[in-house]
């Protein structure tokens, strides 16, 4: 009898607190993670910034091997055009800046890209729409954009406008 | 209702305090939801506006994501303390109560309950339960209140 009473009591508590948990759930199923804190990364002031470039394509790139062999150097050239002698290809040393560039194609001959960059204490990413006819111009704009993040710093998950102190 | 009131008046001051504290924690969790995470089922009819601290820091993250969970789990532990000290719960009943927060989180992870699975929630529940056992050994040891 006493055991039944204990079971009933514990079941009531569990049910009550379970209802509270259900009542505090979001109204619709969400697959979003919880809000992330706002982080601000200061500009990278040192030189040279050692860069490792990883290029891949989200479409069937016939010349992907060639692109992966030649483009990293071209990306570096574009970066150094954007900021003279600021960047150097990491060759046999640990890179300061890891770039992951994924090329997109709209199947009508237009290129775009998704870029994610990692430094040891942070990361940033951006997307460029498939509005480019030549890869040269696309890489040049990617390089300018990356240089903007590197020299200006960046905010992540912050309300805009975000001011880097 | 009068039966609950009668039962409550017969409790010791300590147990009354613990139960009132549990209710206070649940209310604090609800207010926190109202202020910082109002998009929940129970608050949906009120269409509350989400507040934001200007400081987008750990404090804001904690208030949005974890404070209410910690308050809820603490309230659960306080109720269990009172019942444990009244010797009305067996070990298996306590185990069921102890596992409830983790079971809910797992159910969210498997899509059985709405909500977001979060490892830090599990850490929060684990911390609250460990702290509760340290503060109230009667939760697991067969102690009961001195009259």
Image (spheres, coloured by chain):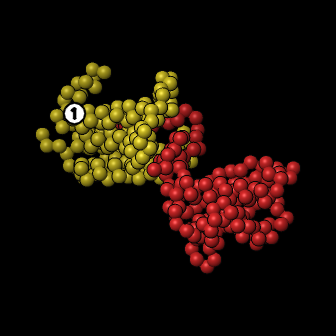
* Looking at the image, residue B108 lies above or below residue A53: above
- Observer-nearest of B67 and A54: A54
* Element under disc 1: helix
Identify the image quadrant of residue A89: bottom right
Q: Residue furthest front?
A: A84
Q: Residues within 10 Å of mark 1 (few under 14, many from 20)?
A: some
* Looking at the image, residue B128 lies above or below residue A28: below
Identify the residue shown where x is 55% and y is 32%: A27
Q: Is residue B53 left or right of residue B91?
A: right
- Observer-nearest of A144 and B19: A144
Quadrant location, the N terminus of chain B: top left
Q: Position of residue B57 (x, y in %)?
A: 42, 46
Q: How many marks?
A: 1
Q: Residue furthest left?
A: B147
Q: Residue furthest bottom?
A: A92
Is residue A31 visible from the viewing direction of this image? yes
Chain A on-screen colour: red
Question: Which chain wears yellow?
Answer: B
Q: Position of residue B9 (x, y in %)?
A: 20, 27
- Observer-nearest of B100 and A74: A74
Q: Which residue is mark 1?
A: B16
């Amino acid at each position: 009898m006493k055991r039944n009473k204990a079971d009933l009591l514990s079941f009531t508590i569990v049910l009550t607190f379970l209802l509270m948990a259900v009542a505090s759930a979001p109204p619709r199923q969400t697959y979003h993670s919880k809000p992330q804190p706002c982080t601000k990364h200061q500009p990278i002031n040192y030189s040279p910034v050692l860069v490792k470039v990883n290029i891949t394509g989200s479409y069937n790139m016939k010349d992907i091997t060639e692109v992966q062999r030649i483009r990293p150097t071209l990306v570096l050239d574009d970066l150094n055009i954007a900021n003279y002698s600021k960047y150097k290809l990491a060759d046999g040393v640990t890179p300061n800046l890891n770039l992951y560039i994924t090329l997109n194609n709209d199947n009508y001959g237009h290129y775009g890209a998704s870029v994610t960059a990692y430094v040891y204490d942070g990361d940033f990413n951006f997307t460029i729409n498939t509005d480019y006819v030549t890869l040269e111009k696309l890489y040049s704009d990617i390089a300018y954009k990356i240089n903007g993040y590197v020299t200006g710093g960046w905010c992540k998950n912050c309300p805009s406008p975000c001011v880097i102190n | 209702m009068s039966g609950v009131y009668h039962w409550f008046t017969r409790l010791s001051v300590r147990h009354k305090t613990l139960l009132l504290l549990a209710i206070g924690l649940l209310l604090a969790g609800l207010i926190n939801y109202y202020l910082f995470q109002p998009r929940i089922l129970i608050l949906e009819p009120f269409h509350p506006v989400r507040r934001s601290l200007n400081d987008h820091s750990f404090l804001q993250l904690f208030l949005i994501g974890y404070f209410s969970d910690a308050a809820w789990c603490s309230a659960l532990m306080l109720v269990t303390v009172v019942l444990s000290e009244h010797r009305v719960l067996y070990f298996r009943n306590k185990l069921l109560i102890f596992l409830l927060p983790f079971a809910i989180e797992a159910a969210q992870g498997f899509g059985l309950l709405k909500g977001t699975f979060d490892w830090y929630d599990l850490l929060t529940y684990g911390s609250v339960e460990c702290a509760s056992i340290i503060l109230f050994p009667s939760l697991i040891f067969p102690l009961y209140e001195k009259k």
